[in-house]
Each structure stands twice: as structure tokens, then as C-alpha cells.
Image: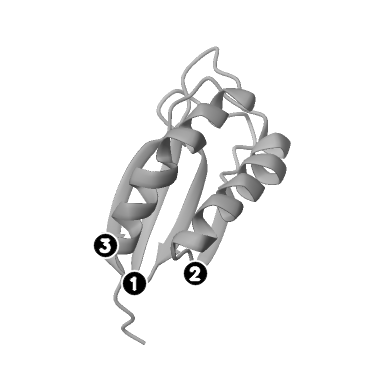
């Protein structure tokens, strides 16, 4: 299993609207990536009781695919449209990582 993780790291003066991210961006992500092999989608909201400090993550998206080829093709086909939507909820840019998951249970 391959996971694409997009992490948003806080900087002073940034804006991040979690409701728009969770409601609208995740719906768009699911709509665009499901036909391209998406098997699971998660949105994470990191908790900061006193507010985030510079360098701390505030949110992340985890998108799961059966293969690296599917994940790379999904990024190539839908990445620009998803990136264009980011401005609707934040002025932070997601840092993307691809990882291979192995179950060890």
C-alpha cells in the first residue's frame, strides 16, 4: 500500500480554515482521486491547546493507493487542480511525501 501525505506546517501570520479543508477540499480530493485508484482518505487536524507555533504541523491529508504507479498517476492527473484549491482554505503550501506501508501485526 502507498500513502501520499500532504502536511501543512504552521508559520507566523498564516491562515488555515479547518472546516473548509475538511468539508470542501476533502470532498474534491475524494471526487478526483477515487477514479484514479484512491482506496482510503483521511484528514488530520493536529491539536495545539495554546495555538500552533512556527514549524508545527496543523493539518495533514493521507491518501491511500494500492500501488506506487497509481499514486504517481493520481498526482500527475489531479495534482494541479487540488493545488489550485488550497488557496480556498489556507496560505500554507502542503509538503507532499509518498511512503510505502507494511503491516506488521
**Tag on residue 11?**
none
**Tag on residue 1?**
1
Identify which residue is drawn at 47% across, 32% down.
83
- Distance from Cα at disc 1 to Cα at disc 2: 10 Å
Q: Is residue 98 visible?
A: yes
The kind of secondary structure element at disc 1 is loop
The residue to which callout 3 is attached is: 69
- Distance from Cα at disc 3 to Cα at disc 2: 14 Å
Identify which residue is drawn at 48% across, 24% down.
92
Residues at circles 1 and 2 in contact by the CB criterion of under 8 Å: yes
Query: Which of the 4 quarters of the picture holds residue 69?
Result: bottom left
Identify which residue is drawn at 58% across, 24% down.
90
Query: Which of the 4 quarters of the picture holds residue 68?
Result: bottom left
Residues at circles 3 and 2 in contact by the CB criterion of under 8 Å: no
Residue 63 placement, left or right of 17: left
Dot 1 or dot 3: first in sequence order is 1
Q: In the orientation shown, which residue stands out farthest toward the bottom?
A: 105
The residue to which callout 2 is attached is: 39
Identify which residue is drawn at 40% across, 28% down.
55
59 to 12, vertically: above or below: below
Residue 30 locus on image (x, y percent): 58, 55
Amino acid at each position: 500500500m502507498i500513502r501520499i501525505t500532504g502536511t501543512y506546517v504552521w508559520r507566523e501570520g498564516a491562515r488555515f480554515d479547518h472546516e473548509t479543508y475538511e468539508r470542501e477540499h476533502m470532498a474534491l480530493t475524494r471526487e478526483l482521486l477515487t477514479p484514479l485508484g484512491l482506496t482510503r482518505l483521511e484528514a488530520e487536524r493536529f491539536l495545539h491547546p495554546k495555538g500552533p507555533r512556527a514549524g508545527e504541523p496543523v493539518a495533514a491529508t493521507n491518501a491511500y493507493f494500492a500501488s506506487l504507479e497509481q499514486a504517481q498517476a493520481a498526482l500527475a492527473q489531479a495534482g494541479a487542480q487540488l493545488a489550485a484549491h488550497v488557496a480556498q482554505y489556507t496560505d500554507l503550501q502542503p509538503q507532499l511525501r509518498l511512503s510505502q506501508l507494511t503491516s506488521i501485526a
